[in-house]
Amino acid sequence: MAADIRSGDDGVLRLGAVNAPGDGIYRMLGELATVAPRLQVRLRRLSLADRLAAVRSGELDAALVRALPAAPELELLPVWTDPLYAALPADHRLADEPVLRLKQLAGLPVRLAPRENNPPFHDLVMDAFRAAGVEVCLGPPFTDFQETLVSIASGPPSWTVLYEVSGLPVFPMVAMRPLAEPALVTSLAVKPGPPSPRVRHLLNALAATGPAAGRRPVLGGHRSGRRVT
């Protein structure tokens, strides 16, 4: 095993990435640069279905996935958990709360993207409403980040659910507050069986740098010294 790990310092790790990955992946890349300096990382941003298919076929060594409970023919290894955030009008009475629960938001229309856009995330939110005993009040659909937040800031009262994102502007008329429930689990999808040396390095880096729950959304860019192609 030690010989395999040393040999894994060379080569290329092909990793499927999620959209708006947050700072966890950048810290992981920095850790990889330390423990395996000759290992190159190639990130590929694909749809969820394409990421999973690429891991099954061997086109990718592994892929990060969010809110996915299971994947046929693959093993899902939870690597970190992040809180979700409610984005609501800054002048709404709930904007003064440090943490929000779904029951507090009952009756306020929620903007969610259609399920077909992201089934695992949509199911996570809807299941959380049911678990909290809250009847969902659906508002206009979530379209994109900027358009939706502008509508929340200037339109009839509504809110939406966000996970940690990076490189996005601050909206002064929108308040972002952590949700007490649900939490968003990010997992690493890999083929079953003993991991390759490259994947072993990746797992160790993820274990060493997993994001801590409860931090504020990241709204600025991050950079690392690792070469990413």
Image: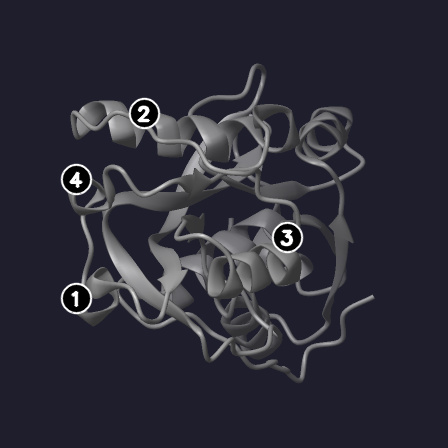
Check whether the beta carbons of the residues at disc 4 and disc 2 lie within 8 A of each other. no
What distance separates the C-alpha of mark 3 from that of mark 1? 44 Å
> Which residue is labeled 3 in the image?
198
Q: Earlier in the sequence, mark 2 or mark 3?
A: 2
Of the numbered discs in the image, which one, if any, rests on residue 80? none
| Amino acid at the residue labelled 1 | Glu
> Which residue is labeled 2 in the image?
127
Count the labels in the image.
4
What distance separates the C-alpha of mark 2 from that of mark 3? 36 Å
Viewer-proximal residue among 192 and 174? 174
Which image quarter: residue 29? Answer: bottom right
Q: Earlier in the sequence, mark 3 or mark 1?
A: 1
- Residues packed near mark 2 inside 10 Å, few (<14), some (14 to 19) or many (20 plus): few
Q: Earlier in the sequence, mark 4 or mark 3?
A: 4
Residue shown at the point (66%, 34%) measured from the top left: 48
| Residue 102 in sight | yes
What distance separates the C-alpha of mark 2 from that of mark 1? 23 Å
| Amino acid at the residue labelled 2 | Asp
Q: Earlier in the sequence, mark 4 or mark 2?
A: 4
Which image quarter: residue 110? Answer: top left
Residue shown at the point (68%, 58%) measured from the top left: 7
Judge left or right: residue 59 versus residue 93: right
> Which residue is labeled 4 in the image?
103
* Residue 146: percent from left, percent from top: 64, 63
| Residue 68 in sight | no
Residue shown at the point (56%, 23%) measured from the top left: 74
Residue shown at the point (63%, 52%) measured from the top left: 198
> Which residue is labeled 1 in the image?
97
In the picture as drawn, the residue positioned furthest to the top comes out as 72
* Residue 140: percent from left, percent from top: 54, 38
